[in-house]
Image (cartoon, rainbow, N blue to C red):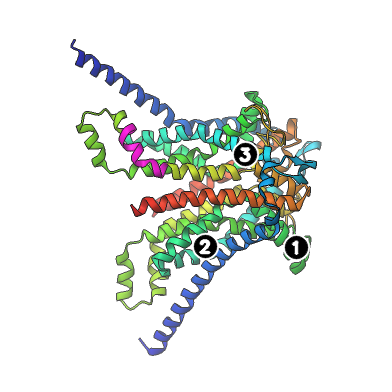
Amino acid sequence: MSDTERSSTHLGRREENIRLGLLAVAFSAVFVLALIILFVFQAGVPLIWKTGLGPFLGGLEWGPTRGQFGILAMIVGTIQVTLGALLLGVPLSLLAAIHLSEFAKPSTRVVLKPLIELLAAIPSVVYGFIGVVVLVPFVRETFGGSGFSVLTAAVVLGVMILPTVISISVDALQAVPHSYREGALALGATPWQAVTRVVVPAARSGIVTAVVLGMGRAMGETMAVIMVAGNAVVVPTSPLHPCRTLTSNIALEMAYAAGDHQKALFATGVVLFVMIFLLNALATALVRRR
Amino acid sequence: MTPETRQDNLRWNRLGQRLCLGMTMAVVAVLVAILAYLVWHGGDRLTIGFFLDFPKDLGREGGILPILVSTMVLAVLALAIAVPLGIGTAVYLTEYTREGWVTTVIRFGAECLAGIPSIIFGLFGFILFVVHLGLGWSILSGALTLACMVLPTIIRTSEEAIKAVPAVLRQVGFSLGATKSQVIWHIVLPQARRGIITGVILALGRVMGETACVIFTTGISMEMPTSPLDSARSMAVHFYLLAREGISMEMANTTALALVGMILLINTAAAVLVARRSSR
Protein backbone atom coordinates (compact mmCIF):
# COMPACT_ATOMS: atom_id res chain seq x y z
CA MET A 1 0.00 0.00 0.00
CA SER A 2 1.45 3.34 -0.98
CA ASP A 3 1.65 6.33 1.32
CA THR A 4 -1.10 8.26 -0.43
CA GLU A 5 -3.50 5.34 -0.28
CA ARG A 6 -2.83 4.81 3.42
CA SER A 7 -3.39 8.46 4.16
CA SER A 8 -6.61 8.49 2.15
CA THR A 9 -8.07 5.50 4.01
CA HIS A 10 -6.90 7.14 7.22
CA LEU A 11 -8.66 10.34 6.16
CA GLY A 12 -11.75 8.34 5.25
CA ARG A 13 -11.89 6.77 8.69
CA ARG A 14 -11.43 10.17 10.31
CA GLU A 15 -14.26 11.64 8.21
CA GLU A 16 -16.50 8.73 9.18
CA ASN A 17 -15.72 9.29 12.87
CA ILE A 18 -16.55 12.98 12.54
CA ARG A 19 -19.84 12.09 10.85
CA LEU A 20 -20.76 9.67 13.63
CA GLY A 21 -19.75 12.20 16.30
CA LEU A 22 -21.97 14.85 14.73
CA LEU A 23 -24.82 12.36 14.42
CA ALA A 24 -24.56 11.72 18.17
CA VAL A 25 -24.51 15.48 18.86
CA ALA A 26 -27.49 15.99 16.56
CA PHE A 27 -29.61 13.81 18.80
CA SER A 28 -28.88 16.00 21.84
CA ALA A 29 -32.17 17.89 21.58
CA VAL A 30 -34.14 14.65 21.25
CA PHE A 31 -32.15 13.21 24.15
CA VAL A 32 -32.91 16.23 26.36
CA LEU A 33 -36.60 16.02 25.44
CA ALA A 34 -36.63 12.32 26.35
CA LEU A 35 -34.90 13.05 29.68
CA ILE A 36 -37.42 15.78 30.51
CA ILE A 37 -40.36 13.51 29.78
CA LEU A 38 -38.74 10.62 31.68
CA PHE A 39 -37.83 12.52 34.84
CA VAL A 40 -40.81 14.86 35.11
CA PHE A 41 -43.33 12.11 34.32
CA GLN A 42 -41.56 9.64 36.61
CA ALA A 43 -41.86 12.09 39.50
CA GLY A 44 -45.41 13.19 38.74
CA VAL A 45 -47.42 10.40 37.14
CA PRO A 46 -47.44 7.97 40.15
CA LEU A 47 -49.16 10.64 42.25
CA ILE A 48 -51.83 11.16 39.55
CA TRP A 49 -52.60 7.39 39.65
CA LYS A 50 -52.60 7.43 43.44
CA THR A 51 -55.07 10.32 43.56
CA GLY A 52 -56.99 9.06 40.55
CA LEU A 53 -57.03 10.87 37.22
CA GLY A 54 -60.58 12.18 37.71
CA PRO A 55 -60.11 13.54 41.25
CA PHE A 56 -56.72 15.04 40.30
CA LEU A 57 -57.93 16.87 37.18
CA GLY A 58 -61.46 17.53 38.42
CA GLY A 59 -60.88 18.15 42.13
CA LEU A 60 -61.43 21.60 43.56
CA GLU A 61 -59.64 20.99 46.86
CA TRP A 62 -55.94 21.82 46.86
CA GLY A 63 -54.62 21.06 50.32
CA PRO A 64 -51.25 19.50 49.63
CA THR A 65 -50.31 19.24 53.30
CA ARG A 66 -53.61 17.43 54.01
CA GLY A 67 -53.17 15.12 51.03
CA GLN A 68 -55.80 16.84 48.85
CA PHE A 69 -54.59 17.21 45.29
CA GLY A 70 -57.24 18.67 42.97
CA ILE A 71 -56.04 21.09 40.31
CA LEU A 72 -59.26 22.00 38.51
CA ALA A 73 -59.12 25.59 39.76
CA MET A 74 -55.60 25.94 38.33
CA ILE A 75 -56.61 24.43 34.97
CA VAL A 76 -59.55 26.84 34.72
CA GLY A 77 -57.29 29.73 35.81
CA THR A 78 -54.72 28.86 33.15
CA ILE A 79 -57.36 28.67 30.42
CA GLN A 80 -59.03 31.93 31.44
CA VAL A 81 -55.79 33.88 31.66
CA THR A 82 -54.54 32.46 28.35
CA LEU A 83 -57.78 33.20 26.48
CA GLY A 84 -57.87 36.69 27.99
CA ALA A 85 -54.33 37.32 26.80
CA LEU A 86 -55.24 36.15 23.28
CA LEU A 87 -58.41 38.26 23.22
CA LEU A 88 -56.33 41.32 23.95
CA GLY A 89 -53.04 40.50 22.24
CA VAL A 90 -54.09 38.89 18.96
CA PRO A 91 -56.21 41.69 17.38
CA LEU A 92 -53.61 44.26 18.43
CA SER A 93 -50.80 42.13 17.01
CA LEU A 94 -52.60 41.43 13.73
CA LEU A 95 -53.38 45.08 13.05
CA ALA A 96 -49.80 46.07 13.89
CA ALA A 97 -48.47 43.26 11.69
CA ILE A 98 -50.68 44.40 8.81
CA HIS A 99 -49.37 47.93 9.19
CA LEU A 100 -45.75 46.78 9.28
CA SER A 101 -46.09 44.43 6.33
CA GLU A 102 -48.54 46.24 4.05
CA PHE A 103 -48.73 49.94 4.77
CA ALA A 104 -45.42 50.98 6.35
CA LYS A 105 -42.56 52.14 4.17
CA PRO A 106 -39.76 49.54 3.98
CA SER A 107 -37.41 51.98 5.71
CA THR A 108 -39.87 52.34 8.61
CA ARG A 109 -40.39 48.60 8.79
CA VAL A 110 -36.68 47.96 9.11
CA VAL A 111 -36.61 50.17 12.20
CA LEU A 112 -39.95 49.23 13.79
CA LYS A 113 -39.80 45.45 13.53
CA PRO A 114 -36.56 45.02 15.52
CA LEU A 115 -37.86 47.63 17.98
CA ILE A 116 -41.01 45.59 18.58
CA GLU A 117 -38.95 42.42 18.84
CA LEU A 118 -37.06 44.08 21.72
CA LEU A 119 -40.28 43.57 23.72
CA ALA A 120 -39.45 39.87 23.65
CA ALA A 121 -36.05 40.56 25.19
CA ILE A 122 -37.48 42.16 28.32
CA PRO A 123 -37.39 39.47 31.04
CA SER A 124 -40.77 38.20 32.22
CA VAL A 125 -40.08 39.24 35.81
CA VAL A 126 -39.84 42.84 34.62
CA TYR A 127 -43.29 42.58 33.00
CA GLY A 128 -44.60 41.20 36.28
CA PHE A 129 -43.01 44.05 38.19
CA ILE A 130 -44.47 46.73 35.91
CA GLY A 131 -47.78 44.91 36.26
CA VAL A 132 -47.59 45.14 40.05
CA VAL A 133 -46.56 48.77 40.29
CA VAL A 134 -48.66 50.20 37.45
CA LEU A 135 -51.45 47.90 36.36
CA VAL A 136 -52.58 46.43 39.70
CA PRO A 137 -53.26 49.85 41.28
CA PHE A 138 -54.95 50.96 38.05
CA VAL A 139 -57.31 47.95 37.99
CA ARG A 140 -58.01 48.33 41.72
CA GLU A 141 -58.98 51.97 41.38
CA THR A 142 -60.88 51.67 38.10
CA PHE A 143 -62.77 48.39 38.49
CA GLY A 144 -62.54 47.64 42.21
CA GLY A 145 -61.34 44.48 43.92
CA SER A 146 -57.77 43.93 45.01
CA GLY A 147 -56.32 44.56 41.55
CA PHE A 148 -54.61 41.15 41.60
CA SER A 149 -56.89 39.44 39.12
CA VAL A 150 -57.49 37.39 36.00
CA LEU A 151 -57.87 40.66 34.09
CA THR A 152 -54.50 42.04 35.23
CA ALA A 153 -52.72 38.78 34.39
CA ALA A 154 -54.42 38.65 30.98
CA VAL A 155 -53.33 42.21 30.17
CA VAL A 156 -49.71 41.55 31.20
CA LEU A 157 -49.63 38.31 29.17
CA GLY A 158 -51.39 40.00 26.27
CA VAL A 159 -48.52 42.47 26.09
CA MET A 160 -45.93 39.72 26.48
CA ILE A 161 -47.19 37.77 23.46
CA LEU A 162 -47.19 40.85 21.17
CA PRO A 163 -43.63 40.48 19.84
CA THR A 164 -44.05 36.76 19.10
CA VAL A 165 -47.37 37.12 17.29
CA ILE A 166 -46.40 40.31 15.42
CA SER A 167 -43.03 39.04 14.27
CA ILE A 168 -44.30 35.72 12.88
CA SER A 169 -47.43 37.31 11.36
CA VAL A 170 -45.31 39.92 9.55
CA ASP A 171 -43.16 37.12 8.11
CA ALA A 172 -46.32 35.25 7.01
CA LEU A 173 -47.81 38.35 5.36
CA GLN A 174 -44.55 39.17 3.63
CA ALA A 175 -44.42 35.67 2.19
CA VAL A 176 -47.65 36.27 0.21
CA PRO A 177 -46.66 36.82 -3.43
CA HIS A 178 -46.86 40.39 -4.63
CA SER A 179 -49.05 39.42 -7.59
CA TYR A 180 -51.96 38.69 -5.19
CA ARG A 181 -52.00 42.31 -4.07
CA GLU A 182 -51.59 43.61 -7.61
CA GLY A 183 -54.41 41.40 -8.83
CA ALA A 184 -56.78 42.65 -6.15
CA LEU A 185 -55.85 46.30 -6.72
CA ALA A 186 -56.24 45.90 -10.50
CA LEU A 187 -59.78 44.63 -9.92
CA GLY A 188 -60.56 47.92 -8.18
CA ALA A 189 -60.17 46.87 -4.56
CA THR A 190 -58.93 49.48 -2.12
CA PRO A 191 -55.62 48.62 -0.38
CA TRP A 192 -57.61 47.81 2.78
CA GLN A 193 -59.86 45.40 0.83
CA ALA A 194 -56.85 43.80 -0.83
CA VAL A 195 -55.28 43.20 2.58
CA THR A 196 -58.34 41.94 4.45
CA ARG A 197 -59.86 39.82 1.65
CA VAL A 198 -56.78 38.54 -0.16
CA VAL A 199 -53.48 38.89 1.69
CA VAL A 200 -54.59 37.94 5.21
CA PRO A 201 -56.55 34.85 4.05
CA ALA A 202 -53.54 33.79 1.98
CA ALA A 203 -51.26 34.11 5.03
CA ARG A 204 -53.72 32.27 7.26
CA SER A 205 -51.57 29.27 8.13
CA GLY A 206 -48.64 31.43 9.20
CA ILE A 207 -50.94 33.60 11.29
CA VAL A 208 -52.41 30.51 12.98
CA THR A 209 -48.86 29.40 13.84
CA ALA A 210 -48.15 32.84 15.28
CA VAL A 211 -51.27 32.74 17.46
CA VAL A 212 -50.52 29.22 18.69
CA LEU A 213 -46.94 30.13 19.59
CA GLY A 214 -48.24 33.18 21.44
CA MET A 215 -50.76 30.97 23.20
CA GLY A 216 -48.00 28.58 24.25
CA ARG A 217 -45.98 31.46 25.59
CA ALA A 218 -48.97 32.79 27.58
CA MET A 219 -49.80 29.37 28.96
CA GLY A 220 -46.23 28.63 30.02
CA GLU A 221 -45.45 32.01 31.53
CA THR A 222 -44.74 31.82 35.24
CA MET A 223 -43.06 34.71 37.00
CA ALA A 224 -45.11 37.56 35.54
CA VAL A 225 -48.35 35.75 36.36
CA ILE A 226 -47.34 34.97 39.95
CA MET A 227 -46.73 38.65 40.57
CA VAL A 228 -50.09 39.95 39.30
CA ALA A 229 -52.70 37.17 39.46
CA GLY A 230 -53.25 37.00 43.22
CA ASN A 231 -52.71 33.21 43.29
CA ALA A 232 -55.78 32.21 45.29
CA VAL A 233 -56.87 28.62 44.62
CA VAL A 234 -60.45 29.32 43.55
CA VAL A 235 -62.31 29.00 40.28
CA PRO A 236 -62.59 32.64 39.22
CA THR A 237 -66.13 33.67 38.33
CA SER A 238 -65.30 37.26 37.42
CA PRO A 239 -62.32 38.81 35.60
CA LEU A 240 -61.67 40.79 38.78
CA HIS A 241 -61.21 37.69 40.94
CA PRO A 242 -57.73 36.42 41.71
CA CYS A 243 -56.64 33.11 40.20
CA ARG A 244 -53.77 30.67 40.19
CA THR A 245 -52.35 29.08 37.03
CA LEU A 246 -50.66 25.68 36.71
CA THR A 247 -47.27 27.34 36.28
CA SER A 248 -47.62 29.57 39.34
CA ASN A 249 -48.79 26.60 41.40
CA ILE A 250 -45.45 24.92 40.72
CA ALA A 251 -43.29 27.97 41.27
CA LEU A 252 -45.08 29.16 44.43
CA GLU A 253 -44.78 25.92 46.36
CA MET A 254 -41.64 24.31 44.94
CA ALA A 255 -39.39 26.04 47.46
CA TYR A 256 -40.81 24.24 50.48
CA ALA A 257 -42.69 21.23 49.09
CA ALA A 258 -41.59 17.73 50.07
CA GLY A 259 -42.84 14.17 49.64
CA ASP A 260 -46.25 13.81 48.01
CA HIS A 261 -46.64 17.59 47.88
CA GLN A 262 -43.54 17.87 45.69
CA LYS A 263 -44.74 14.97 43.54
CA ALA A 264 -48.06 16.79 43.11
CA LEU A 265 -46.18 19.80 41.73
CA PHE A 266 -44.43 17.54 39.22
CA ALA A 267 -47.86 16.12 38.37
CA THR A 268 -49.02 19.70 37.75
CA GLY A 269 -46.04 20.01 35.40
CA VAL A 270 -47.12 16.83 33.60
CA VAL A 271 -50.61 18.28 33.02
CA LEU A 272 -49.12 21.55 31.74
CA PHE A 273 -46.75 19.63 29.46
CA VAL A 274 -49.60 17.56 27.99
CA MET A 275 -51.76 20.67 27.46
CA ILE A 276 -48.99 22.48 25.58
CA PHE A 277 -48.14 19.36 23.60
CA LEU A 278 -51.78 18.91 22.51
CA LEU A 279 -51.98 22.59 21.60
CA ASN A 280 -48.92 22.31 19.35
CA ALA A 281 -50.18 19.08 17.78
CA LEU A 282 -53.50 20.79 17.03
CA ALA A 283 -51.70 23.72 15.42
CA THR A 284 -49.55 21.42 13.28
CA ALA A 285 -52.68 19.56 12.16
CA LEU A 286 -54.46 22.84 11.33
CA VAL A 287 -51.54 24.11 9.28
CA ARG A 288 -51.04 20.77 7.47
CA ARG A 289 -54.68 20.41 6.49
CA ARG A 290 -54.53 23.45 4.29
CA MET B 1 -70.55 50.45 -8.71
CA THR B 2 -72.52 53.35 -7.31
CA PRO B 3 -70.58 56.39 -6.13
CA GLU B 4 -71.77 55.88 -2.52
CA THR B 5 -70.20 52.44 -2.14
CA ARG B 6 -66.97 53.63 -3.72
CA GLN B 7 -66.97 56.45 -1.17
CA ASP B 8 -67.65 53.94 1.61
CA ASN B 9 -64.83 51.69 0.47
CA LEU B 10 -62.40 54.56 0.46
CA ARG B 11 -63.55 55.64 3.91
CA TRP B 12 -63.03 52.10 5.24
CA ASN B 13 -59.65 52.05 3.56
CA ARG B 14 -58.56 55.21 5.36
CA LEU B 15 -60.05 54.04 8.65
CA GLY B 16 -58.42 50.60 8.44
CA GLN B 17 -55.01 51.98 7.61
CA ARG B 18 -55.20 54.49 10.45
CA LEU B 19 -56.30 51.78 12.87
CA CYS B 20 -53.30 49.64 11.92
CA LEU B 21 -50.95 52.59 12.29
CA GLY B 22 -52.48 53.42 15.68
CA MET B 23 -52.02 49.86 16.95
CA THR B 24 -48.40 49.79 15.82
CA MET B 25 -47.79 53.04 17.64
CA ALA B 26 -49.51 51.59 20.74
CA VAL B 27 -47.15 48.60 20.73
CA VAL B 28 -44.09 50.83 20.39
CA ALA B 29 -45.53 53.07 23.13
CA VAL B 30 -45.69 50.08 25.50
CA LEU B 31 -41.98 49.44 24.97
CA VAL B 32 -41.11 53.10 25.45
CA ALA B 33 -43.33 53.34 28.55
CA ILE B 34 -41.70 50.31 30.22
CA LEU B 35 -38.19 51.62 29.56
CA ALA B 36 -39.15 55.14 30.66
CA TYR B 37 -40.65 53.80 33.89
CA LEU B 38 -37.49 51.88 34.75
CA VAL B 39 -35.19 54.80 33.93
CA TRP B 40 -37.39 57.27 35.81
CA HIS B 41 -37.59 55.19 39.00
CA GLY B 42 -34.23 53.46 39.00
CA GLY B 43 -31.92 55.66 36.94
CA ASP B 44 -30.49 57.82 39.71
CA ARG B 45 -29.15 54.84 41.68
CA LEU B 46 -27.57 53.21 38.65
CA THR B 47 -23.92 54.15 39.15
CA ILE B 48 -20.63 52.32 38.64
CA GLY B 49 -20.66 51.72 42.39
CA PHE B 50 -23.92 49.78 42.08
CA PHE B 51 -22.14 47.21 39.92
CA LEU B 52 -19.02 47.10 42.11
CA ASP B 53 -20.50 47.00 45.63
CA PHE B 54 -21.51 43.98 47.64
CA PRO B 55 -25.21 43.87 48.60
CA LYS B 56 -25.92 44.81 52.21
CA ASP B 57 -28.96 44.12 54.38
CA LEU B 58 -30.51 41.51 52.00
CA GLY B 59 -30.09 43.90 49.09
CA ARG B 60 -31.71 46.99 50.61
CA GLU B 61 -28.37 48.78 50.37
CA GLY B 62 -25.13 48.39 48.47
CA GLY B 63 -24.76 46.91 45.01
CA ILE B 64 -24.90 43.67 43.08
CA LEU B 65 -21.26 42.65 42.45
CA PRO B 66 -21.49 38.93 43.39
CA ILE B 67 -24.87 38.71 41.66
CA LEU B 68 -23.46 40.26 38.51
CA VAL B 69 -20.51 37.84 38.57
CA SER B 70 -22.84 34.86 39.15
CA THR B 71 -25.06 35.95 36.26
CA MET B 72 -22.06 36.18 33.92
CA VAL B 73 -20.59 32.83 34.98
CA LEU B 74 -23.99 31.14 34.70
CA ALA B 75 -24.60 32.58 31.23
CA VAL B 76 -21.13 31.80 29.88
CA LEU B 77 -21.19 28.26 31.24
CA ALA B 78 -24.69 27.61 29.83
CA LEU B 79 -23.63 28.83 26.38
CA ALA B 80 -20.34 26.89 26.54
CA ILE B 81 -22.46 23.75 26.88
CA ALA B 82 -25.27 24.63 24.45
CA VAL B 83 -23.34 26.29 21.59
CA PRO B 84 -21.16 23.32 20.52
CA LEU B 85 -24.17 20.98 20.72
CA GLY B 86 -26.36 23.42 18.80
CA ILE B 87 -23.84 24.11 16.04
CA GLY B 88 -23.00 20.41 15.78
CA THR B 89 -26.67 19.57 15.33
CA ALA B 90 -27.08 22.31 12.72
CA VAL B 91 -24.01 21.09 10.80
CA TYR B 92 -25.30 17.53 10.81
CA LEU B 93 -28.78 18.57 9.67
CA THR B 94 -27.55 20.79 6.83
CA GLU B 95 -24.33 19.14 5.63
CA TYR B 96 -24.46 15.44 6.41
CA THR B 97 -27.92 14.22 5.68
CA ARG B 98 -30.84 14.53 3.34
CA GLU B 99 -34.34 15.14 4.60
CA GLY B 100 -35.60 11.82 5.96
CA TRP B 101 -36.83 10.24 9.14
CA VAL B 102 -33.63 11.16 11.03
CA THR B 103 -34.00 14.87 10.34
CA THR B 104 -37.74 14.67 11.02
CA VAL B 105 -37.10 13.18 14.46
CA ILE B 106 -34.36 15.71 15.29
CA ARG B 107 -36.43 18.69 14.11
CA PHE B 108 -39.48 17.42 15.98
CA GLY B 109 -37.39 17.09 19.15
CA ALA B 110 -35.98 20.59 18.82
CA GLU B 111 -39.42 22.06 18.11
CA CYS B 112 -40.99 20.35 21.13
CA LEU B 113 -38.11 21.51 23.30
CA ALA B 114 -38.63 25.09 22.12
CA GLY B 115 -42.28 24.96 23.20
CA ILE B 116 -41.67 23.68 26.74
CA PRO B 117 -42.24 26.40 29.38
CA SER B 118 -39.25 27.39 31.49
CA ILE B 119 -40.92 26.24 34.71
CA ILE B 120 -40.87 22.66 33.38
CA PHE B 121 -37.15 23.03 32.64
CA GLY B 122 -36.89 24.16 36.27
CA LEU B 123 -38.63 20.99 37.50
CA PHE B 124 -36.48 18.86 35.23
CA GLY B 125 -33.20 20.55 36.25
CA PHE B 126 -34.13 20.24 39.89
CA ILE B 127 -34.96 16.54 39.78
CA LEU B 128 -32.09 15.50 37.47
CA PHE B 129 -29.15 17.79 38.21
CA VAL B 130 -29.87 19.00 41.75
CA VAL B 131 -31.26 15.75 43.20
CA HIS B 132 -30.30 12.71 41.08
CA LEU B 133 -26.83 13.80 39.98
CA GLY B 134 -26.15 15.35 43.38
CA LEU B 135 -24.94 18.68 42.02
CA GLY B 136 -27.10 20.53 44.55
CA TRP B 137 -28.29 24.09 44.05
CA SER B 138 -25.33 25.26 42.05
CA ILE B 139 -24.19 27.32 39.10
CA LEU B 140 -23.44 24.06 37.26
CA SER B 141 -27.01 22.73 37.74
CA GLY B 142 -28.40 26.07 36.57
CA ALA B 143 -26.08 26.24 33.55
CA LEU B 144 -26.95 22.70 32.45
CA THR B 145 -30.67 23.47 32.74
CA LEU B 146 -30.34 26.74 30.83
CA ALA B 147 -28.25 25.00 28.17
CA CYS B 148 -31.11 22.53 27.57
CA MET B 149 -33.50 25.47 27.33
CA VAL B 150 -31.61 27.52 24.73
CA LEU B 151 -30.42 24.55 22.66
CA PRO B 152 -33.34 24.76 20.15
CA THR B 153 -32.72 28.50 19.61
CA ILE B 154 -29.08 27.89 18.77
CA ILE B 155 -29.90 24.95 16.50
CA ARG B 156 -32.44 27.00 14.53
CA THR B 157 -30.34 30.14 14.07
CA SER B 158 -27.17 28.17 13.22
CA GLU B 159 -29.07 26.05 10.72
CA GLU B 160 -30.39 29.15 8.96
CA ALA B 161 -26.93 30.71 8.89
CA ILE B 162 -25.32 27.56 7.46
CA LYS B 163 -28.07 27.12 4.86
CA ALA B 164 -27.40 30.67 3.65
CA VAL B 165 -23.80 29.81 2.68
CA PRO B 166 -23.75 29.44 -1.15
CA ALA B 167 -23.22 25.88 -2.39
CA VAL B 168 -20.58 27.06 -4.85
CA LEU B 169 -18.17 27.81 -1.98
CA ARG B 170 -18.41 24.19 -0.85
CA GLN B 171 -17.81 22.96 -4.41
CA VAL B 172 -14.68 25.10 -4.65
CA GLY B 173 -13.43 23.53 -1.44
CA PHE B 174 -14.09 20.00 -2.66
CA SER B 175 -12.49 20.71 -6.03
CA LEU B 176 -9.31 21.74 -4.22
CA GLY B 177 -9.25 18.31 -2.60
CA ALA B 178 -10.56 19.25 0.82
CA THR B 179 -12.49 16.64 2.77
CA LYS B 180 -16.01 17.27 3.98
CA SER B 181 -14.94 18.18 7.52
CA GLN B 182 -12.25 20.52 6.17
CA VAL B 183 -14.80 22.26 3.95
CA ILE B 184 -17.13 22.70 6.91
CA TRP B 185 -14.43 23.87 9.30
CA HIS B 186 -12.53 26.17 6.95
CA ILE B 187 -15.23 27.41 4.58
CA VAL B 188 -18.82 26.90 5.77
CA LEU B 189 -18.51 27.83 9.45
CA PRO B 190 -16.39 30.97 8.86
CA GLN B 191 -18.92 32.09 6.23
CA ALA B 192 -21.85 31.43 8.58
CA ARG B 193 -20.07 33.03 11.54
CA ARG B 194 -22.11 36.20 11.74
CA GLY B 195 -25.46 34.42 11.72
CA ILE B 196 -24.30 31.92 14.31
CA ILE B 197 -22.99 34.67 16.60
CA THR B 198 -26.31 36.49 16.28
CA GLY B 199 -28.12 33.39 17.52
CA VAL B 200 -25.69 32.98 20.40
CA ILE B 201 -26.17 36.60 21.42
CA LEU B 202 -29.96 36.21 21.42
CA ALA B 203 -29.59 33.07 23.54
CA LEU B 204 -27.36 35.02 25.94
CA GLY B 205 -30.11 37.60 26.45
CA ARG B 206 -32.63 34.86 27.13
CA VAL B 207 -30.35 33.12 29.64
CA MET B 208 -29.73 36.36 31.53
CA GLY B 209 -33.42 37.22 31.85
CA GLU B 210 -34.56 33.76 32.88
CA THR B 211 -35.93 33.34 36.39
CA ALA B 212 -38.27 30.37 36.76
CA CYS B 213 -35.79 27.64 35.93
CA VAL B 214 -32.79 29.33 37.59
CA ILE B 215 -34.34 29.83 41.01
CA PHE B 216 -34.94 26.06 41.46
CA THR B 217 -31.56 24.92 40.16
CA THR B 218 -29.07 27.61 41.18
CA GLY B 219 -30.65 28.77 44.42
CA ILE B 220 -30.60 32.23 45.93
CA SER B 221 -27.25 32.58 47.77
CA MET B 222 -25.90 36.14 47.61
CA GLU B 223 -22.28 35.14 48.29
CA MET B 224 -19.55 35.60 45.69
CA PRO B 225 -19.30 32.20 43.94
CA THR B 226 -15.90 30.49 44.16
CA SER B 227 -16.67 27.31 42.22
CA PRO B 228 -19.30 26.08 39.73
CA LEU B 229 -20.69 23.93 42.53
CA ASP B 230 -21.58 26.97 44.65
CA SER B 231 -25.14 28.15 44.92
CA ALA B 232 -25.61 31.62 43.47
CA ARG B 233 -28.21 34.23 42.61
CA SER B 234 -28.69 35.65 39.13
CA MET B 235 -29.75 39.25 38.52
CA ALA B 236 -33.23 38.23 37.40
CA VAL B 237 -33.73 36.13 40.54
CA HIS B 238 -32.34 38.92 42.73
CA PHE B 239 -34.75 41.38 41.16
CA TYR B 240 -37.65 38.96 41.60
CA LEU B 241 -36.90 38.45 45.29
CA LEU B 242 -36.43 42.17 45.94
CA ALA B 243 -39.77 42.98 44.34
CA ARG B 244 -41.82 39.94 45.33
CA GLU B 245 -40.81 39.92 48.98
CA GLY B 246 -41.04 43.69 49.20
CA ILE B 247 -37.42 44.00 50.36
CA SER B 248 -36.78 47.21 48.48
CA MET B 249 -38.76 48.53 45.52
CA GLU B 250 -36.07 51.16 44.83
CA MET B 251 -33.30 48.57 44.56
CA ALA B 252 -35.65 46.34 42.53
CA ASN B 253 -36.11 49.20 40.06
CA THR B 254 -32.39 49.79 39.75
CA THR B 255 -31.62 46.08 39.34
CA ALA B 256 -34.34 45.79 36.69
CA LEU B 257 -32.94 48.78 34.84
CA ALA B 258 -29.42 47.31 34.94
CA LEU B 259 -30.67 43.93 33.73
CA VAL B 260 -32.89 45.29 30.97
CA GLY B 261 -30.15 47.70 29.91
CA MET B 262 -27.64 44.87 29.57
CA ILE B 263 -30.07 42.64 27.67
CA LEU B 264 -31.10 45.44 25.31
CA LEU B 265 -27.44 46.25 24.60
CA ILE B 266 -26.84 42.58 23.81
CA ASN B 267 -29.89 42.44 21.54
CA THR B 268 -28.99 45.68 19.79
CA ALA B 269 -25.56 44.20 19.07
CA ALA B 270 -27.29 41.20 17.52
CA ALA B 271 -29.60 43.44 15.45
CA VAL B 272 -26.62 45.45 14.17
CA LEU B 273 -24.87 42.23 13.16
CA VAL B 274 -27.97 41.10 11.26
CA ALA B 275 -28.28 44.47 9.53
CA ARG B 276 -24.62 44.43 8.49
CA ARG B 277 -24.97 40.88 7.21
CA SER B 278 -27.97 41.67 5.04
CA SER B 279 -26.44 44.86 3.67
CA ARG B 280 -23.28 43.11 2.54
| Magenta highlight range | B184-196
Q: Which of marks 3 and 1 is in front?
A: 3
Seen at 35% across and 86% down, the residue is B1
Image position, residue A22 (x, y; %): 39, 28
Image position, residue B216 (x, y; %): 67, 36
Please check the rendered image and state whether residue A48 is part of the magenta-colored stretch, yes or no.
no
Q: In which quarter of the image is the N terminus of chain A?
A: top left
Query: Which residue has dot 2 on it?
Result: A93
Q: Tell me, yes or no, whether the two marked residues, 3 and 1, touch with CB atoms within 8 Å.
A: no
Amino acid type, residue under disc 2 in the picture: Ser
Please check the rendered image and state whether residue B185 is part of the magenta-colored stretch, yes or no.
yes
Q: In which quarter of the image is the C terminus of chain A?
A: bottom left
Which mark, residue B71? 3
Question: Which quadrant of the figure has residue A191?
Answer: bottom left
Q: Nearer the viewer, residue A129 or B60?
A: B60
The secondary structure type at the circle numbered 1 is: helix
Image position, residue A164 (x, y; %): 51, 54
* Residue extending furthest toward the left: A2
The secondary structure type at the circle numbered 2 is: helix
State which tag comes first along the sequence, 1 or 2: 2
Query: Which residue has dot 1 on it?
Result: A137
* Residue A23 appears in the figure: yes
Vertical relation: A261 (above or below) A3: below
